[in-house]
Structures are given as structure tokens and as C-alpha cells.
């Protein structure tokens, strides 16, 4: 064992000492003036000096008050290139004659050191010190809350805010849509982005099929490039095995990656056994092996797969709500949701605006379609369950986002947002606050809703981009929100702590709110049924009267135009023909008065 000692001495303890004393000032050099040097100088009076520009204080070329106008304004700064490099760690602390990799030599050397007297004395001395501090730490708990129950939460209400902290841009020249985001399960250190063009018959040449995994610490270059045979519509990480990724392609195939092996697909499904339309929904299923998954497409089929055998699906379900199990009557699946807390049930959002609740444990395929919810006018772009209350789920489509409960089968939503002028494209719940969710719109705005405090207006609306926002996902801690645009940009926004911190009794209050709204909807549903029964009885008692189709059409036309005029007045727009109508009405009033 090599033992080194350091000897430290102050500078004043060795060498010649410095002696300081007081003495008067002393002239060492005296240079008298030389009158002959004045002949070399030319006096100038008055002095006129013109300045056109100030000194350039930065490497900036541009027009401004200090610099002359430049036709090509630019900032001459270099982008910082960040690189991650590994370090070769070699175990140290062993003598040269001991190989750290040989367990016998290291064990023998430890035994020799433990038999030394210095080792025993050192351990005894350190043991008494450690024991003293352990006893001291166990005696007094410095973090103990004495008044935890009586403490009132009188915190100042922080104004909700959000700011963009990072942007990932599609590195290709031909921009594609950012159709889906998936956060890495390991502390959300990376995000997988699916890039695909969903425009009908998009025939742009040289369009790239790649999708990317972005590291939050390196926003300029992707960490991994996924190279599928067809553009990927959806990507999902496996929460059990972080290296496995599932992808649904535009041509209907299911692709599986092992990121440890690179960006090429590990395996994919055959075309003849895959979906016939793009795969809009794919998710992993909780199982012992962690290899089972589920996929849905607009061809009307839900397929179960095992990545160990992707040659054919293990199970199939046709989304025929007539329960005849016919593919020609099936509804197209455009969104899919599955949570581990309800392992046998999953939700499907369709192109026809209907949400289907399915049960995998049913014996026959028709019985697997458990409940049907008539939700939106157009396609249901997203359907997702509440992470705190799995029976409550959220859907987005047309111009609204709606909250449903599985306890009420044949009823409308228990809560909903206002009608927006722009389409709502995606939605996700906050993973930390049960009443908070995020919606993105086609006008590039991110809305943050907190239904526990505001139900008619969002708590915060942020203009993220001028392009339509198509996808949104939140990290597990709820602090950072990822938004994908139609031009392939992914913006990361950090929200204020008030929108991502669970408050006292918030979960209880949210549960009470959902139960209250469910009871209210149930009462309204019963009253509506009673009104329908009374109307049917009244129609049976009265003789049948044939309606004039012309009168019905005329009344509907008048109602339609009156609604348009009211909407124009509300927006402050000029209503055509309104001045003439007002003049005619004034003339009629004057005639009646005369």
C-alpha cells in the first residue's frame, strides 16, 4: 500500500523575514523639460472633430442608430454543439500487485488489511463518531411538523402561465405532420415523435418516412432515427420494457422496435394479415411477458398481437354496433384508449362520432361491444380515461371536449367545454391533477382547463404556433407539455406550479363534482323520457294531421337565416339587408301612427 504524507508550513515560518519601517519620501529620478521639443508640435485652434458612428461593441451587422445600414442583417454567432461522451472508469485504490478483477486476490488483500492494528484503531475511532451522530439524528427530528393539521393553506393564488422552453423541428426539407407523441418511461428524458402526412392523396416527391426519438438535452439532432417501410401514424413506448417501441403504420402494418439494436424495425406484421387502412390507435397490454399489444384502424377492426409472433393476430374484433359481426357494417376506429387499472376494458373512438366501450372477456364477439355513446358530430379524434377515476373518460371531436361516465349508458355527456370557432384536434388529462386537462386547436392554441374552478372558460390559453396543433401529451410530473404541429414542429411548454401541483382535498372535491354532474344528468334523462312518453300519448289521442312540406321547408329556412343574422350581430359583422328591413319597419310604424 502506498501511503503519502503532506507537510504544510506557512510562508512566514521559513525564508528571510520582511522588515517594514517608516521613512521620508525620496526623489529617485528627475527629468527636466526640454524646450527644443516644442518645435515639433503644431498648435491647432479651434479643434473640430466630426464623428459619424460610434464604436462597434458586438459582432452584429445590421441597421440601427449605432451601425450603418446593412442590406444583409445577421448575427455572427456560432451555435453551440453539445456532445455526450462516455468515460472509461477504472477501479482504483488497489496496489499494483493486486488485480481488481480477481476476486481471490482482492479478498486476500482485504483480510490482510483487516488484521493490521492501524485498521482496527481507525475503525474504532470512526465507529464511535458515526454512532454519536446516528444517536443525535434519531433523538431529534428536525423535519417534524408540529402544526400540520392546524396549518391553513393560505397561499397566494399564482396567475397561471406557460412558456416555451424547447422546440424540436423536423430535419427534412419536406415537412410532415406530427401525428403522435410518446414520452420515455424513464423520467421522461426523451420523447418519441411520429411523423406522417395524413392529407388525402399527398403525392409530394422525395417524402421521408423516418420518425425520430428526441433527447431533451440535444434539441438540434435526434437521438435515434426510426426507419419504417411506411410512415408511422402512432408510436408508443412499453412501460414495462423501455427499449421496446410499438408503431402503427399508414399502410396498416404493426411495427416493433428494439432501440438497443438501432432504428431498423425488429419485426413487422405481414401485409395480408394487417389492417387495410392506417393504424390510428395502438397500445401495449399489461401481461406477464409485456409483449402483448392492441391496434385499431379505420377499416373497422381491433386486432390483438404478440410481438414474439407477429405473423398473424391472436384475436380479432369487428366494430359492428348492430352486433351482427359484419365487416361491411363496421365503424372505423380513429382513436383507442387502454389503461392498466381496467385490464379487460378499452375505449374506441370512431369516425362516425360514436364511442364504443368494449370488454375483452366476453364470450362472443357481439358481446364484446358493451356500451355505445353517441358523442360528437364528427370524428372522435381522442378518447382517454381519467387517471384518478377510470370510469370517467374524456373525448374530443368537432368543436368541443366532453366528459363521460360509464355509469350512465344511454345518456349525453355529464360535462363539456364551450363551442370553439376552431376544431379541437387532441386532448390529454393532467397526470397529477384530476380535474385538469389540455386541449389543442386547429388555430394553434393550447387550452388548459381546470373544471374544478372554471367550466365555461379555460384557465389559460397559449398561442403556441401559427400552424394547427395536432397532438398533445404531458409528462408524468405534469410540468412539461409537448405539442405537435402540422408542419412537424414539437414545442415543449413548462406550466406554472399551480397547474401541476395537487392541492389539499382536490381529489375528493373532483369526485364530488363528477358524482353531482352524473346525478344531474340522470335526472334530466328521466325527465326527457317522461316528456317523450307524454308526447307519444298525446299523438295517439289526436287524429293524424298531414303536414304541408312547403310550410315545413319555409319555416326551417326562416329559422336558419335568423340564426345566421343573430350570429353575425354577435360578432359585430354587418348584416346584409338589415338597413332596408329597418327602413321598411320604420315606414310601417309611421303609417300606423298616421
Image (spheres, helix red, strand yellow):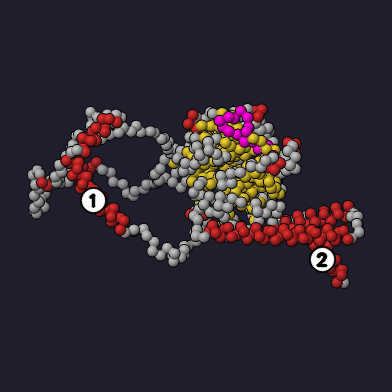
Q: As rendered, which of 47 and 262 lies closer to the eye?
A: 262
Q: Residue at x 75, y 59 (%)?
A: 528
Residue 23, image x, y percentages: 8, 53
Q: Residue furthest bottom?
A: 594
In the figure, 138 relative to 60: above or below?
below
Q: Which residue is drawn at 9% across and 47% down?
A: 17
Q: Quadrant of the N terminus?
A: top left
Q: As rendered, which of 437 and 96 lies closer to the eye?
A: 96
Residue 526, image x, y percentages: 73, 59
Circle 2 is placed at which residue position? 586
Residue 207, image x, y percentages: 60, 30
Was residue 188 drawn as part of the magenta stretch in this picture?
no
In the figure, 153 relative to 263: above or below?
below
Q: In which quarter of the image is the C terminus?
A: bottom right
**351 left or right of 99?**
right
For numbered disc 2, what is the local secondary structure?
helix
Assess disc 2: are there few (<14), some (14-19) or many (≥20) residues with their C-alpha within 10 Å of its C-alpha.
few
Q: Which residue is drawn at 9% across and 54% down?
A: 22
For numbered disc 1, what is the local secondary structure?
helix
Q: As rendered, which of 301 and 376 lies closer to the eye?
A: 301
Q: As rendered, which of 116 and 568 lies closer to the eye?
A: 116
**196 left or right of 72?**
right
Quadrant in the picture for residue 575: bottom right
Mark 1 vs mark 2: give the one in front.
1
Circle 1 is placed at which residue position? 129
Q: How many marks?
A: 2
Residue 369, image x, y percentages: 69, 44
Which residues lie in the magenta part? 300-314
Amino acid at each position: 500500500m502506498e501511503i503519502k504524507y503532506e507537510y504544510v508550513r506557512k510562508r512566514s515560518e521559513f525564508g528571510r523575514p520582511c522588515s517594514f519601517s517608516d521613512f521620508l519620501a525620496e526623489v529617485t529620478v528627475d527629468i527636466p523639460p526640454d524646450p527644443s521639443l516644442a518645435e515639433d508640435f503644431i498648435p491647432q485652434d479651434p479643434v473640430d472633430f466630426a464623428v459619424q458612428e460610434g464604436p462597434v461593441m458586438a459582432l452584429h451587422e445590421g441597421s440601427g442608430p449605432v451601425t450603418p445600414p446593412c442590406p444583409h442583417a445577421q448575427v455572427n454567432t456560432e451555435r453551440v454543439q453539445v456532445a455526450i461522451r462516455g468515460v472509461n472508469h477504472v477501479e482504483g485504490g488497489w496496489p499494483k500487485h493486486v488485480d481488481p478483477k480477481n476476486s481471490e486476490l482482492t479478498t486476500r488483500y482485504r483480510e490482510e488489511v483487516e488484521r493490521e492494528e492501524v485498521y482496527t484503531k481507525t475503525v474504532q475511532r470512526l465507529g464511535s463518531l458515526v454512532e454519536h451522530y446516528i444517536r443525535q439524528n434519531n433523538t431529534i427530528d428536525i423535519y417534524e411538523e408540529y402544526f400540520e393539521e392546524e396549518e391553513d393553506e393560505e397561499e397566494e393564488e399564482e396567475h397561471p402561465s406557460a412558456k416555451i422552453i424547447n422546440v424540436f423541428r423536423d430535419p427534412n426539407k419536406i415537412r410532415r405532420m406530427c401525428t403522435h407523441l410518446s414520452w420515455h418511461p424513464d423520467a421522461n428524458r426523451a420523447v418519441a415523435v411520429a411523423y406522417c402526412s395524413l392529407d388525402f392523396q399527398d403525392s409530394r416527391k422525395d417524402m421521408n418516412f423516418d420518425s425520430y426519438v428526441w433527447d431533451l438535452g440535444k434539441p438540434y439532432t435526434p437521438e435515434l432515427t426510426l426507419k419504417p417501410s411506411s410512415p408511422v401514424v402512432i408510436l408508443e413506448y412499453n412501460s414495462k420494457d423501455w427499449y421496446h417501441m410499438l408503431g402503427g403504420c399508414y399502410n396498416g402494418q404493426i411495427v416493433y422496435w428494439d432501440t438497443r439494436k438501432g432504428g431498423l424495425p425488429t419485426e413487422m406484421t405481414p401485409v395480408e394479415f394487417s389492417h387495410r387502412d392506417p393504424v390510428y390507435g395502438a397500445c401495449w397490454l399489461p401481461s406477464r411477458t409485456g409483449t402483448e399489444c392492441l391496434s385499431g384502424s379505420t377499416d373497422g377492426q381491433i386486432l390483438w398481437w404478440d410481438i414474439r409472433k407477429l405473423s398473424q393476430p391472436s384475436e380479432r374484433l369487428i366494430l359492428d354496433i348492430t352486433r351482427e359481426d359484419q365487416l361491411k357494417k363496421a365503424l372505423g376506429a380513429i382513436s383507442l384508449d387502454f389503461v392498466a387499472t381496467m385490464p379487460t376494458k378499452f375505449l374506441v373512438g370512431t369516425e362516425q362520432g360514436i364511442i364504443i366501450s368494449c370488454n375483452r372477456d366476453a364470450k362472443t364477439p357481439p358481446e364484446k361491444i358493451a356500451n355505445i355513446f353517441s358523442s360528437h358530430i364528427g370524428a372522435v379524434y381522442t378518447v382517454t380515461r381519467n387517471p384518478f377515476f377510470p370510469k370517467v373518460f374524456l373525448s374530443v371531436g368537432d368543436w368541443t371536449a366532453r366528459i363521460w361516465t360509464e355509469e350512465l349508458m344511454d345518456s349525453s355527456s355529464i360535462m363539456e367545454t364551450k363551442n370553439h370557432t376552431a376544431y379541437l384536434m387532441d386532448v390529454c388529462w393532467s397526470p397529477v391533477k384530476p380535474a385538469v386537462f389540455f386541449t389543442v386547436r386547429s388555430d394553434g392554441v393550447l387550452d388548459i382547463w381546470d373544471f374544478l374552478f372554471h367550466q365555461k372558460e379555460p384557465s389559460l390559453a397559449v398561442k403556441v404556433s401559427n400552424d394547427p396543433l395536432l397532438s398533445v401529451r404531458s409528462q408524468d410530473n405534469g410540468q412539461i407539455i409537448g405539442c405537435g404541429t402540422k408542419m412537424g414542429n414539437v414545442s415543449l411548454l413548462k406550466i406554472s406550479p399551480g397547474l401541476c401541483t395537487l392541492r389539499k382535498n382536490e381529489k375528493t372535491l373532483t369526485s364530488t363534482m363528477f358524482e353531482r354532474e352524473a346525478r344531474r344528468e340522470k335526472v334530466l334523462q328521466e325527465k326527457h323520457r317522461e316528456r317523450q312518453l307524454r308526447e307519444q300519448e298525446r299523438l295517439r289521442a289526436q287524429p293524424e294531421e298531414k303536414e304541408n312540406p312547403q310550410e315545413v321547408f319555409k319555416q326551417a329556412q326562416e329559422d336558419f337565416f335568423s340564426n345566421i343574422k343573430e350570429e353575425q350581430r354577435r360578432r359585430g359583422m354587418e348584416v346584409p339587408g338589415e338597413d332596408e328591413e329597418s327602413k321598411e319597419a320604420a315606414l310601417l310604424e309611421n303609417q300606423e301612427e298616421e
